[in-house]
Image: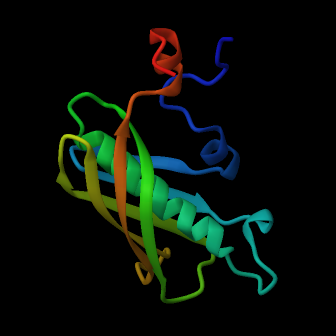
Amino acid sequence: MQSRTPPGANPFVEHLGVQPLVVSHGHAEIKLAVRHEHLNGLGVAHGGVVMTLLDVVMAVAAKSADPDQMGMVTVEIKTTFMRPAKGDLHALGWCDHFSTTMAFCRGELRDSQGRLLAQSMGTFKRMRSFNRRRASGAD
């Protein structure tokens, strides 16, 4: 079976409307203009949207630090919510340490005024893509 997803693409992130801004060695930035479907019952960005942005920006930062550009799978993530998230959101991520199997990252979510809304720390495991694993018979 052939995948319809190009390597590196993330259909869920594309569905949310996340836009990449910066990807460099160990650093990434993305943005999201919060829409009605991103809101919770209180009229602010759902916590799952906030955590998704932080998870994605840290994983992209980790992948940008990987000389083999392998996929990153979240092992654990801790997020602290500080302010309600609304409007245009800017997520920044850094890979602080990279080993042969893991990446240790941190992320921030800021609003259009630069206020810190949430912060995260995450651990990511390097993974070959599942499509490559199937092709090599490594299931």
Quarter of the image with the N terminus is top right
Q: Residue at x 34, y 60 (%)?
A: 93
Q: Is residue 5 left or right of residue 22?
A: right
| Residue 29 seen by the camera | no
In-front residue for pair 43/48: 48
Using the rendered view, name the quadrant where residue 127 is placed. top left
| Residue 44 seen by the camera | yes
Q: Residue at x 40, y 72 (%)?
A: 120
Using the rendered view, name the quadrant where residue 35 is placed. bottom right
Query: Measured along the vertical axis of the image, is residue 67 above or below residue 139?
Result: below
Picture coordinates of residue 74, whole percent (x, y): 45, 53
In-front residue for pair 59/28: 59
Q: Is residue 41 left or right of residue 94?
A: right
Query: Measured along the vertical axis of the image, is residue 133 above or below residue 65?
Result: above
Q: Residue at x 48, y 53 (%)?
A: 56
Picture coordinates of residue 102, whole percent (x, y): 27, 48
Q: Is residue 106 left or right of residue 85?
A: left
Q: How many marks?
A: 0
Colour basis:
rainbow
Query: Measured along the vertical axis of the image, is residue 11 above or below residue 27?
Result: above
Query: Measured along the vertical axis of the image, is residue 80 above or below residue 18?
Result: below
In-front residue for pair 139/51: 139
Q: Residue at x 44, y 46 (%)?
A: 73
Using the rendered view, name the quadrant where residue 64 is placed. top left
Q: Is residue 46 left or right of residue 68?
A: right
Picture coordinates of residue 57, whole percent (x, y): 42, 55
Picture coordinates of residue 94, whole percent (x, y): 27, 59
